[in-house]
Image: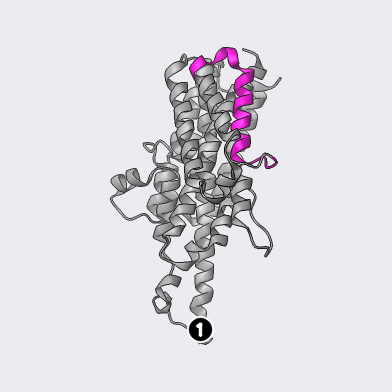
Amino acid sequence: MLARVANNLFWMGRYIERSEHIARYLSVNYFSSLDAPNEHSQSRQFVLQSMLFMVGHPHKGDQILHEPDVLYNIGLNMDKEFSIINCVKFARENANSARDLISTELYEAINKFYHFVLNYSVEDYKNKMLYDFTSHIIEFTAILKAKIRTTLLQDEVYSIIKLGVNLERAMQVIRIINAKYNDILIIKNQQSIEITQNQQGQAVGDESQLPKEHRTDTGLEWSTLLKCVESYDMMRRFHKKTPNNINTLDFLILNENCPRSVVNSLAEVAKHIQVLSSEKTIHKGSSIFLVNKIYSEYKYKYIEEIEVDFRTFIKDILDKLVAISKKMEEEYFAY
């Protein structure tokens, strides 16, 4: 297989996975905020800033964000590299370049996906059809991953695609966790300001003295995080507790039985990279070495270790995942 074609397969898998996570974050974060019990979580500016933060373009300054514009930029604006429509476009372009190695069924599903997004009404999407649009994106990506699993030979082509899917999944889950964690910090910071003064400018003793609509409910944000990653029901089944910082982060990062967890994704990456490696001895610094090193490191971590300095953990693991991606491209996909 040509390295160029292998690279196309790898990035096809990544863009499919990326479009799904962006769409689910938009949908869950937006609609959960409409029923939020406190004023902070209901704020449209807060929700829009969270969306931009998740896709890697945090809002800076005091300028008011306009909901239709933000939704359009993330969903259907082809001038924004991070948009869903560009993810789908890039997935199709990469599929075109590897057409001979994938099944007709998979290619047709990708083509149908692309034309659905390309022809979607921008005005309808901006004003009233966010749920319809994101639901279709999630359904199409589920179909694509089913086609990958059920119509392709379980060979190098399959492993390359799955490498892209699982590496991107680990990255997107971390980005979603980081975005919701940032939301919680913002809420708490606003809450602390309100606690220090009441409406007359007098000191307030504790959070319970604030009006109900101003009180922090971090449990809601942790629940929203789990729903953004389609893991709420299984987390409740596993831990049998209300979501909080410890059990939510433990489930999404370190639980190997959770199919969306970072450790599970790393296990899948380690499994599929083994198919591509012809090395009898694993050399230090190689892709397979780096993958197994980070997998082993996080497989035996406790969530309490991570939670102590969560910002550093986020930066560290994202840097490592990016390094793995670059090393893979250098070893297997450079042309």
Could you tell me if residue 212 is visible in this image?
yes
In the structure shown, which secondary structural element does the residue marked by tag 1 occupy? Answer: loop
Q: Which of the 4 image quadrants contains residue 85?
A: top right
In the rendered view, tell whether residue 260 sits above or below residue 161.
below
- Please say whether residue 86 is one of the residues in the magenta stretch: yes
Please state if 80 lies on the left or on the right of 48 as rendered.
right
For image coordinates 53% across by 70% down, the residue present is: 190
Residue at figure coordinates x 45%, y 37% from the top left: 263
Residue 284 visible? The answer is no
Residue 265 % position (x, y): 47, 34
Q: Is residue 244 above or below residue 10?
A: below
Q: Position of residue 277 (x, y in %)?
A: 55, 18
Image coords of residue 186 (percent x, y): 54, 63
Residue 222 occupies quadrant: bottom left
User: In the image, is residue 26 part of the stretch drawn in magenta?
Assistant: no
For the C terminus, the image quarter is: top right
| Label 1 neighbour load within 10 Å: few <14, some 14-19, many 20+ | few
In the rendered image, which residue does mark 1 sit on?
199
Residue 223: give x, y in percent of width and height.
40, 53
Q: Which residue is drawn at 62% across and 31% down?
A: 89
Q: Is residue 31 above or below residue 187?
A: above
Q: Which of 263 and 90 is in front in this view?
A: 90
Answer with left or right where residue 243 lies relative to residue 118.
left
Q: Which residue is drawn at 43% across and 55% down?
A: 32
Kind of residue at badge 1: Gln
Quadrant the N terminus occupies: top right
Q: What stretch is highlighted in magenta?
A: 79-105
Magenta residues: mostly which secondary structure? helix
